Amino acid sequence: MEPSLPPLGSRSAPDVHRAGAGARFAFAILAVLALYAVDLVCVLAAPEAASDLMRAVAVPFDLMVCAPAAFYLIVLRRFGLSPALVLPVVALGGAASAALAPVGRPSLHLPLAAAALALEAAIVVREGRKVARAYRAAKVASSRPNDWFAAALGVLVRSERIARLGADELAAEWYLVRSWGRTPDIPPGCRAFSQHRRSGHAALVGTIVAVMLVETAAVHLLMARWSAPAACALTALSLYACAILVGDARATALSPLLVDDRALTVRWGARFCERIPLDAVRSVGSSEPGEDAPKSERLSLAAMGARPCWIELSRPVPVRTAFGGVRAIRWLCVGPDDPAASARAALEARDALATPVPA
């Protein structure tokens, strides 16, 4: 299986017109919020005789029909996004309509809620099939959970950056739940070099998690004096962060550096995987780049405590950043457990690639 991410720029459409998409999305959000604001003002300012009618008819129609329709027409249909993205707008409108509905009187909210449930079920079934097909196809083509989830999310959103960010988070959760007992991901024809044993990465993550748990307990007790819901929310976020750290550590253990006959695959945790072409590798060793090397062209992926191994490239190579962007690098620092063996394997593969095959 191919261990790399899909090539940069392989997706079409969306990212080319990102600025226009962002402006249109912001306009749609403002239109939805304007409907909410107008309805709230009308409900508060209307005479008592008309207030119940507005709460029972006008507010549900605006928030459960007009607002979702505006969001769908301005953003989703214009950019070919999944109709599933309109479901949160429908759900929010239904919750607001239920909260404002007059007590003990007929309301348009109930029939609209039934219609919304039927519509949501139809959209979920239709889009769910597309997501499942994309997920299965990606699982056949790649061994990385990131690629599986990115393909599935790509059905819903056309932005590669958003799909990749969401996929990275889901991949960390997958490693947390599904990776126990699995062997490292080493595709056929690749030489693998672990990068988590000698650096003590697992011990470091364990220490951080233990400290976070103690701090979480203390903060929860302190915050609970003022607000129990806020304390519970902070505790849930802290526990989730601890879980993601553990999942990322598992991903590091199962994702060694790879060398094949054409590329050096650099992986770290659940959030970084790039194939560096061997013909772009100039040198591999412990020497750090000089002071004249721009910081923007350097990227360090070595764990704390690992012996750094610097890869110098002969030309800038684009890689994805942690936040889904792209930047070109010339120097890359990794931390394999055996720097000498990994450097020797990369240089031998590079030299073999450059050696002409006799006729």
Image (cartoon, rainbow, N blue to C red):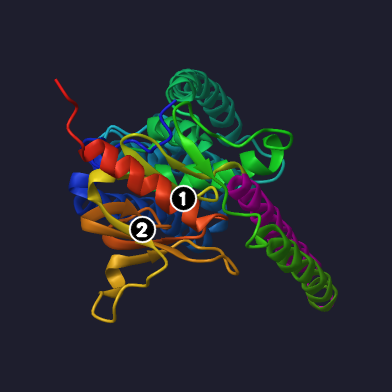
The magenta stretch is 225-253
Quadrant for residue 67, please give it.
top left
Residue that extends furthest to the left in the rendered view of this protein: 359
Query: According to the image, label 1 marks what residue?
Result: 342
Q: Nearer the viewer, residue 136 or 347?
A: 347
The image position of residue 64, as x and y in percent, is 48, 38
Report x, y in % for residue 50: 52, 50
Quarter of the picture holding the N terminus: top left
* Left or right for 121, reference 79: right
The residue nearer to you, when weighing 47 against 7, is 7
The answer to whether residue 74 is seen in the rendering is no
The residue at 83%/73% (across/down) is 224
Q: Which residue is mark 2?
A: 284
The answer to whether residue 39 is left or right of residue 179 is: left
Q: Nearer the viewer, residue 344 or 241?
A: 344
Q: Residue at horizontal 43%, vertical 59%? A: 37
Is residue 246 shown in magenta? yes
Q: Is residue 201 above or below residue 350?
A: below
Say if 123 sits above or below 208 in the image: above
Q: Amino acid at mark 2?
A: Val
Q: Amino acid at mark 1?
A: Ser
Examine the residues drawn in magenta and state their main secondary structure: helix
Quadrant the C terminus occupies: top left
Q: Quadrant of residue 261?
A: top left
Under circle 2, the secondary element is: strand
